[in-house]
Amino acid sequence: MATASFDKSFVVKDKQSIDQIHQDMANPRHIKVKKRDYTAESKRGIELLKQRLSDSETC
């Protein structure tokens, strides 16, 4: 979903929900992104593709 086109107003009246929003904003979740080796993944993908294609030639 494109967040740039998201334009909607929300009205929160529940005290518990407001407190939870404040708590969530004060303590954001930290997301750790795993580093990927795209070159190695590409080589492995090509090896698997070659293996599959060579197997299909013998059948």
Image (cartoon, rainbow, N blue to C red):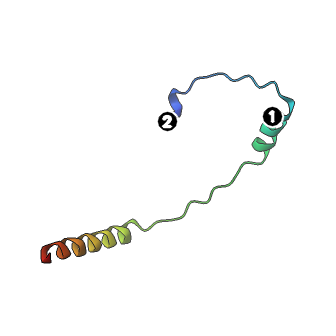
> Label 1 near label 2: C-beta < 8 Å?
no
Q: Amino acid at mark 1?
A: Ser
Please tell me in which quadrant of the rendered image residue 10 appears: top right
Determine whether the residue tagged by mark 2 lies in a helix, strand or loop. Answer: loop
Q: Position of residue 23 (x, y in %)?
A: 81, 42
Residue drawn where x is 51% and y is 27% of the image: 5
Residue ID for mark 2: 1
Q: Amino acid at mark 2?
A: Met
Disc assigned to residue 26:
none
Label 2 or label 1, whichever comes before in sequence order: 2
The foreground one among 17 and 36 is: 17
5 to 19, vertically: above or below: above
Residue ID for mark 1: 17
The foreground one among 39 and 9 is: 9
Residue drawn where x is 77% and y is 26% of the image: 12
Left or right of 48 in this view: 6: right
Q: Position of residue 30 (x, y in %)?
A: 68, 55
Task: Give how far apart the Cα atoms at labels 2 and 1 are.
Answer: 24 Å
Left or right of 32 in this view: 47: left
Determine whether the residue tagged by mark 1 lies in a helix, strand or loop. Answer: helix
Check disc 2: other Cα within 10 Å, few if <14, some if 14-19, many if 20+: few
Q: Position of residue 1 (x, y in %)?
A: 49, 36
Check disc 1: other Cα within 10 Å, few if <14, some if 14-19, many if 20+: few
Q: Position of residue 15 (x, y in %)?
A: 86, 30
